[in-house]
Amino acid sequence: MKTITKILATSAAAVALFVSTNVNAQTTPRNLGVGIIAGVPTSDAYSVALGADLRYQFNVDKQLSIPVTAGYTHFSGKEIGNTGVDFPSFGYIPVKVGAKYFFNESGSGVYGLAELGAGFGTKEGSGTSFVYSPALGYSWSNGLDLGVKYEGLSRNSNNTGYVGLRLAYGFSL
């Protein structure tokens, strides 16, 4: 699984580099977004997922863009039932690339987003996970962005994730 994750992360970086070179040649506008995330974990071992991210977005046209996202997400562990066993908290750094499509021709309004990448554990020995994240959101023309997303992590047949709300603000570059 480590080799597959490294291949996916390298492929995502290569795609991002190719797209950025191609997009810059066309002088297409770019955006930088800063977001905060709060979510409900899909596993009983965690109580809450909190995070923040930066998203660099290459606008192919008004409706389609290629986002490259990196940030930090923290899962707070909790006691499982009344067993007295506390599940440990963990954090990871997701690095993802994807496609974002606006359903309105203006380049704002309702959008769909799909991202793939790698999640790098922050504790020693936590390793790297495959990360996938579909989302639906609404982006206002003033830069405000509100989205509902699922982010899943998969490593060595261990899967977890969260359903979250992302509030962000985007700047045109």
Image (cartoon, grey):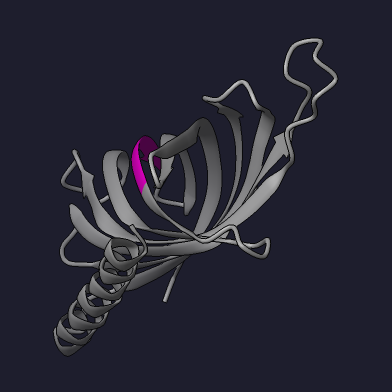
Total numbered labels: 0
Q: Quadrant of the N terminus?
A: bottom left
Q: Vertically, is 93 above or below 23?
A: above
For residue 159, side relative to residue 47 (left or right): left
Q: Quadrant of the C terminus?
A: bottom left
For residue 126, which quarter of the picture?
Answer: bottom right
Q: Residue at image x 48%, y 35%?
A: 161
Q: Residue at image x 18%, y 81%?
A: 18
Magenta stretch: includes residue 1: no
Residue 110: x, y in percent? 30, 35
- Pick the residue in front: 162 or 113: 162
For residue 77, which quarter of the picture?
Answer: top right
Residue 37: x, y in percent? 59, 43
Residue 32: x, y in percent? 46, 68
Magenta stretch: includes residue 133: yes
Q: Which residues are magenta?
A: 132-139
Q: Residue at image x 74%, y 40%?
A: 88
Please, what is the dominant secondary structure of the magenta stretch? strand
For residue 150, which quarter of the picture?
Answer: top left
Residue 167: x, y in percent? 56, 43
For residue 83, side relative to residue 127 (left or right): right
- Pick the residue in front: 88 or 115: 88
For residue 147, side relative to residue 43 (left or right): left
Res 91 seen here: yes
